[in-house]
Image (spheres, helix red, strand yellow):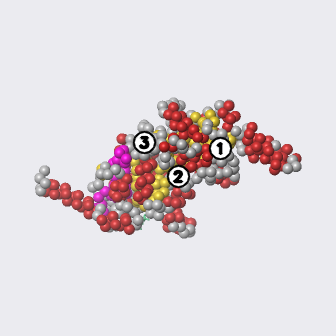
């Protein structure tokens, strides 16, 4: 081809028009809102020069209704393609708010579907960066159809490839359902929000005044609804978080998570995690400190930190191997299991199981949260989710009982009876049908009623109960746990135990799927 000829010049001219559309003034428009441009976000996420864009020149199908010049809207408001993150293939779509508010029309949807299909076909994770006004009004049903096809692919890909949604602007209307169907949702504070119906509709229908932030900001979705698993001060940090999260995952459900060399200096003269747990069973402590002393240095990455903090979920490495951790948090509500913590734990466990990530359970739980509110809102049904998730998971599963393992909570928190591979307890463990206070009230009701000093007697009975019934040695002697271990050996023990489970394989009965209580 002649480099000075018409054919080549036409080609260059086309590229120039594309550059103008994505020129500095468009990028400034985003920056002025405290946001990055769709392509800047991609550049931050992917390894240098690894991103390959697809369909950059497709044009919009939006009819020219005089509502805006759309004939030059190359790309139709979304950038798609693939590249490498930490050397591994990842597909992406990144909505461009500068083109018709990132709204989703037929071509925009077709592009997203293209990368969804490719990612599923080759078995690579997919990331969606959302910044969109939702269904494109001018395209009507074509937009709705596009969204629905995206949802369908989200569901088909669920449990096959990791799917991550990053909300970096508006996500309104039905558009929120694609993120909700993916595995993890990230949000940037102040610039992102998600809701089904916006403040105007809320005002109209309910006559309530709410701001975008109050209705669906990052804090709200992290703390109250649990829709957002990770929130960050800004977009840059959110994207760094995405990279970190991906480092724990295999590319698809047929692979194992990648091994990553980590610091293991803990093995020498490390502080025992047992020092964190007080002998007094009524004293709280922070289970995250226990986690830090067990896993590889600085490897713990907590998910859904702000939602239901009475259960802690997150990923970490143990001698370089990725694991998922589910831990009761005695610092919050004494670590009790309630509706929100059940749902949070169950969803996390199911992700780990789908992607071959072994699960470590750290147990210190006084039981399920009693009361009208919990019962009326369905703790029976929701608590069953946690039980179901632990029980159906076939990945290696190990439990360490740090302190309390009372009642139904003992059964639910990955007991050996629901398929836990190994169950260890620390000498501080208390394993029984219920806590001493409840047990004493039932077993010694009459003696306490007739006692001169019932308070003193109650204390004596409770001490006896702890010593004779609620200790870990009975469970050990009867084989309900595998061993009472020295807390100082926990890390070593776990590394060796997970190693034995490397080739774990469980045949499941043939069925379409189980019927998890929803
Ligand atoms: C077409 C849209 C659009 C949309 C925004 N734009 N949303 N165009 N369809 N849904 C265009 C605007 O006309 C404007 O074009 C440009 O994008 C930027 O929008 P602004 O309003 O100027 O931006 P801002 O003030 O930042 O407000 C952003 C916004 C607001 C809050 C998102 O645009 C908004 O409320 N949009 C509608 C949101 C919505 O209700 N979407 C439908 C939800 S229902 P110009 O040419 O002026 O730059 C839905 C159903 C899906 O999504 C169902 C799936 C099953």
Decide: is 197 above or below 182.
below
Q: Earlier in the sequence, mark 1 or mark 2?
A: 2
Q: Main secondary structure of the magenta part?
A: strand
Say which residue label 3 marks: 261
Q: Nearer the viewer, residue 65 or 403?
A: 403
Label 3 residue SS: loop
Q: Which residues are magenta?
A: 70-95
Label 1 residue SS: strand
Residue 240 in the image: x percent, y percent?
A: 42, 54
Residue 7 is covered by the magenta coloring: no
Whether residue 11 sits left or right of residue 385 in the image: it is left
Residue at the image point whose x is 87% and y is 47% from the top = 451
Label 2 residue SS: loop
Residue at the image point whose x is 35% and y is 61% from the top = 37
Say which residue label 2 marks: 304
Residue 353 in the image: x percent, y percent?
A: 50, 40
Residue at the image point whose x is 51% and y is 32% from the top = 500
Residue 73 in sight in this render = yes
Whether residue 114 sits left or right of residue 151 in the image: it is left
């Amino acid at each position: 081809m002649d480099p000075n000829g018409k054919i080549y010049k036409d080609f260059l001219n086309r590229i120039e028009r594309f550059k103008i559309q994505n020129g500095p003034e468009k990028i400034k428009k985003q920056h002025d809102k405290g946001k990055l441009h769709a392509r800047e976000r991609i550049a931050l996420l992917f390894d240098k020069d690894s991103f390959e864009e697809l369909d950059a020149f497709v044009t919009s199908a939006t009819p020219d209704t005089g509502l805006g010049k759309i004939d030059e809207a190359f790309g139709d408001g979304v950038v798609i393609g693939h590249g490498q993150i930490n050397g591994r293939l990842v597909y992406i779509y990144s909505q461009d708010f500068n083109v018709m508010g990132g709204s989703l029309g037929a071509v925009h949807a077709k592009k997203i579907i293209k990368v969804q299909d490719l990612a599923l076909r080759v078995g690579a994770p997919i990331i969606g960066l959302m910044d969109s006004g939702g269904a494109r009004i001018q395209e009507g049903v074509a937009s709705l159809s596009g969204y629905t096809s995206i949802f369908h692919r989200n569901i088909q890909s669920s449990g096959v490839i990791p799917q991550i949604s990053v909300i970096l602007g508006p996500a309104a209307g039905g558009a929120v359902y694609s993120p909700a169907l993916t595995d993890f949702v990230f949000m940037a504070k102040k610039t992102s929000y998600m809701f089904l119906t916006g403040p105007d509709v809320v005002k109209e229908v309910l006559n309530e005044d709410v701001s975008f932030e109050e209705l669906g900001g990052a804090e709200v979705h992290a703390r109250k609804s649990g829709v957002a698993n990770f929130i960050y001060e800004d977009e840059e940090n959110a994207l760094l978080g995405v990279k970190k999260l991906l480092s724990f995952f295999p590319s698809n459900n047929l692979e194992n998570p990648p091994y990553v060399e980590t610091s293991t200096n803990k093995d020498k003269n490390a502080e025992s995690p047992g020092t964190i747990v007080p002998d007094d069973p009524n004293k709280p402590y922070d289970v995250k400190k226990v986690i830090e002393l067990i896993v590889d240095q600085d490897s713990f990455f907590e998910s859904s930190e702000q939602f239901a903090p009475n259960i802690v979920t997150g990923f970490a490495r143990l001698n370089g191997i990725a694991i998922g951790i589910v831990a009761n948090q005695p610092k919050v509500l004494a670590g009790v299991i309630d509706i929100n913590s059940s749902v949070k734990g169950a969803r996390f466990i199911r992700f780990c199981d789908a992607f071959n990530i072994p699960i470590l359970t750290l147990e210190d739980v006084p039981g399920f949260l009693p009361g009208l509110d919990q019962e009326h809102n369905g703790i029976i049904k929701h608590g069953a989710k946690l039980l179901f998730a632990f029980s159906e998971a076939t990945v290696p599963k190990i439990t360490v009982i740090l302190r309390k393992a009372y009642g139904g909570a003992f059964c639910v928190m990955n007991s050996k009876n629901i398929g836990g591979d190994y169950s260890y307890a620390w000498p501080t463990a208390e394993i029984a049908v219920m806590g001493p206070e409840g047990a004493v009230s039932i077993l010694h009701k009459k003696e306490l009623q007739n006692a001169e000093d019932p308070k003193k007697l109650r204390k004596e009975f409770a001490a006896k109960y702890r010593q004779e019934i609620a200790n870990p040695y009975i469970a050990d002697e009867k084989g309900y746990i595998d061993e009472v271990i020295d807390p100082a050996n926990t890390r070593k023990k776990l590394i060796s135990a997970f190693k034995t489970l490397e080739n774990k394989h469980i045949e499941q009965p043939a069925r379409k799927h189980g019927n998890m209580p929803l």
